Image (cartoon, grey):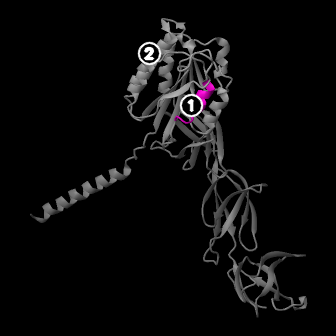
Amino acid sequence: MNIKRILYKLFFLFITFNFITYNSFSQKPEEKKPTTRILFVFDASQSMLGEWETDTKINIARNFLIKMVDSLEQLPNVMMAIRIYGHQSPVPPQDCEDTKLEVAFAPNNGTRIRQKLRFITPKGTTPIAHSLELCGNDFPPIPNCRNIIILITDGVEACDGDPCKISLELQKKGIALRPFVIGIGLDLQFKKSFECIGKFYDADNEKQFGDILGLIISDALNKTTAQVNLLDQFGKPTETDVNMSFYDSFSGLLKYNYIHTMNFRGNPDTVELDPLLTYKMVVHTIPPVTVDSIALTSGKHTIIPADCPQGYLQMKLEGANNYQNLNAIIRKSGEMNTLNVQPANVLEKYIIGKYDLEILTLPRIIASVEIKQSTTTTVQIPKPGMVTLLMISQGYGSIYLELEKEIQWVCNIDPNVTKQTIVLQPGDYRVVYRARNSKQTFYTVEKNFKITTGGSISVSL
């Protein structure tokens, strides 16, 4: 084999290796989809034997639900269960504990759910609150899941329970999303009582019931897209590269974290969100920006604007110096809450506005700055000097900055050493010292010294 053919083969191997390597690192990692668990809470109280349109309510409801189970069991990442109430004890008397998880969550349980539905006979009362309360135990803990309750009923609470309170507790604990409620031929006076439980759908007729059930399942299974526009001072979506946290407004639980990104066209990239929730979004700028009550429509792209105009701040140290890990405390102007501790010579972004800085030099440098849109505000830190204190024995004392009419405390001397080097800003200082073994204040020593930029001085005590 000649040299030219060898070189061609090496070149081909090189190109192939780089192509494989590029694709393996450039492909977007496949996100593991959450498991959607749908718990049907089915009314089998005595009133479900009533005539409605072409048949009894129970027959119409179970036939539609069986068809829905047929469809759902074909889908990946979907699990089903069914709780039925009012089917075990006849009235009278009233049995307010007549509710049972008939088929628990499990893979491939569609046949069991259909079988159970086919042989249900309505008998009893309507313990909605107690049934919802027990739903909390129907969802065994698993990671990466969405828990959805679909309540199908033709009546209101009959056992003096509080379905609204129970539903609220389930949602606040993060056990389930806001439930769906399908009312079958409910009287107008009862419809309002279900709005506090969850998202209520009123089925006035047989066809509408089937349409509503299909719509709910579609909403339950689909994510929708949103675009977060982080707006600058001029209302343009130019800000980016910051984390956005999405919380369930109702339960307060964290649902998503996304680092905001511009796509290849220079527009804010699209994120996927669960449309069943209302969100509070926190954009982790400094200080953070919060947008509350974000509601999405399933299947509809939503634009979420947030005012996040930012500029840059830098505390700059010139040349070689004796500072190690020098930081500054950043606060909003006139406020004491610490927003950030920023190292020197590091560029950091802040929402535009006025800020107070406390640079942790000795003595402290206090400064006020204004951050402007897309510009860098620089605070120059003077180059320090050093003083070395030489003490005949361990003792007590402090260093003070000489002002016009008074002295200002800077720092205390380490009482456990006889030699100490301290980095100070340029200025006039005084050291006050007394040896530990001197038991009379008469032996207090005072000495003045001057620190110059980049200079070093020794003071004997």
Give me the residue at 79% from left, 87% from top: 395
Category of crowding for the residue at label 2, using alpha-carbon neighbours closer than 10 angstroms: few (below 14), some (14–19), many (at least 20): some
State which quarter of the image contains the C terminus: bottom right
Q: Mark 1 points at which residue?
A: 296
Q: Camera-side residue: 297 or 72?
A: 72
Category of crowding for the residue at label 1, using alpha-carbon neighbours closer than 10 angstroms: few (below 14), some (14–19), many (at least 20): many
Magenta span includes 131: yes
Give me the residue at 64% from left, 17% from top: 191
* Secondary structure category for the residue under label 1: loop
Report which quarter residue 315 is drawn in.
bottom right
Q: Is residue 206 visible?
A: yes
Give the spatial CA distance, label 2 vs label 1.
Answer: 31 Å
Q: What amino acid type is highlighted by mark number 1? A: Leu
* Secondary structure category for the residue under label 2: helix
Give me the residue at 64% from left, 33% from top: 168
Q: Camera-side residue: 405 or 276?
A: 276
Residue 403: give x, y in percent of width and height: 85, 75
Q: Is residue 177 visible?
A: no
Q: What amino acid type is highlighted by mark number 2? A: Asn
Label 2 or label 1, whichever lies nearer to me, is 2
- Point out the residue furthest to the left here: 1
Q: Name the residue under label 2.
A: 63
Q: Camera-side residue: 146 or 335?
A: 146
State which quarter of the image contains the N terminus: bottom left
Q: Using the image, determine if residue 103 lies above or below residue 336.
A: above
Magenta span includes 87: no
Magenta residues: mostly which secondary structure?
A: helix
Report which quarter residue 187 is drawn in.
top right
Residue 2: give x, y in percent of width and height: 10, 64
Q: Where are the magenta residues, as a range?
A: 128-138
Residue 108: give x, y in percent of width and height: 38, 31
